[in-house]
Image (cartoon, helix red, strand yellow):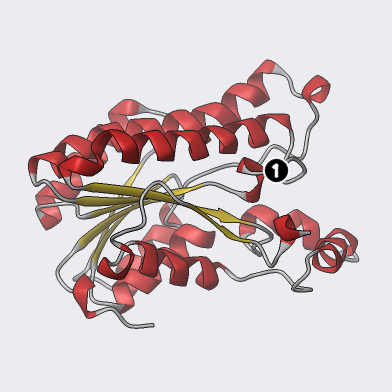
Amino acid sequence: MKFEEYKGKTVFITGAASGIGHAQAVAFLENGANVFGFDVDELGLLKLQQQHPKHFAFALGSVCKKSDVERAFADVIAVFGEVNILLNTAGVLDGFAKSLETDEALWDKIMNTNVKGTYFVTNTILPHMLQHKSGVIVNMASIAGLIAGGGGAAYTASKHAIVGYTKQLDLDYCRDGIRANAIAPGAIQTPMTKADFEGDGEMAQWVADETPAGRWAQPSEVASLTLFLASQAADYMHGAVIPLDGGWIAK
């Protein structure tokens, strides 16, 4: 999938070191964009920089720390001069813990990363986009943001929050040139879901069997959808949450 329009554009991606964020970075780089990655994992970011030295830069830090986010934003402006597209992809799972199995520390970890982190990054970059009267934001929701069963109590609550936040974000700023949508992935084979494939892979097989498409998806499939959502071809899509789940929620 090729989009000539991304040449010269700058994409800021959280969670770019691995999984879906890494696949998104690769996809936009292959389409001529400048990509700025933000993650706690230096190794994954360094590999991307070695492969794309002219068009990829990064900052280490946590989306949970406002000072880290602000420093990363200063870095991307210093290197590329602008941010045209924001991909809020960083997130963590909760091990499918039920409410009584979720202590305060786990609850805070999930909410601080998945919800507050998205809020911190968005509110840091959004004023820049508003100044230019143009910007695209793609948030990472989940099928757990649409139905129960895609995560535990904290994760499901956090992804429902992302769905609502995305809709409100677009409603509040779409007349100012901002377009916000979200992707709701189902079973994606990433380092975050590695545990499902360990041992005899019984859990991974169960998930595949329960998915109408009969398989897990690869991060590149989420990246391909992101390329479309961020493009001019999707300009009339506002506040949408697009499932990419092999038919899971259609059952």
- The residue type indicated by label 1 comes to Ile
Q: Quadrant of residue 196?
A: bottom right
34 lies above or below 16 = below
Going 47% across and 46% down the picture, which residue do you hit?
90
User: Residue beneath label 1, please?
Assistant: 147
193 lies above or below 247 = above
Q: Residue furthest top?
A: 104
x and y, in percent, of residue 69 in the image = 30, 35
The kind of secondary structure element at disc 1 is loop
In screen coordinates, is 133 left or right of 45?
left
Which corner quadrant holds the N terminus? bottom left
From this viewpoint, is residue 206 visible?
yes
Looking at the image, which is closer to me, 84 or 37? 84
Going 82% across and 20% down the picture, which residue do you hit?
100
13 lies above or below 190 = above
Which corner quadrant holds the C terminus? bottom right
For mark 1, does the 10 Å Cα neighbourhood hold few (<14), some (14 to 19), or many (20 or more) residues? some
x and y, in percent, of residue 45 in the image = 38, 59
From this viewpoint, is residue 62 visible?
no
Going 44% across and 34% down the picture, which residue do you hit?
165
Looking at the image, which is closer to me, 53 or 179? 179
x and y, in percent, of residue 41 in the image = 46, 50
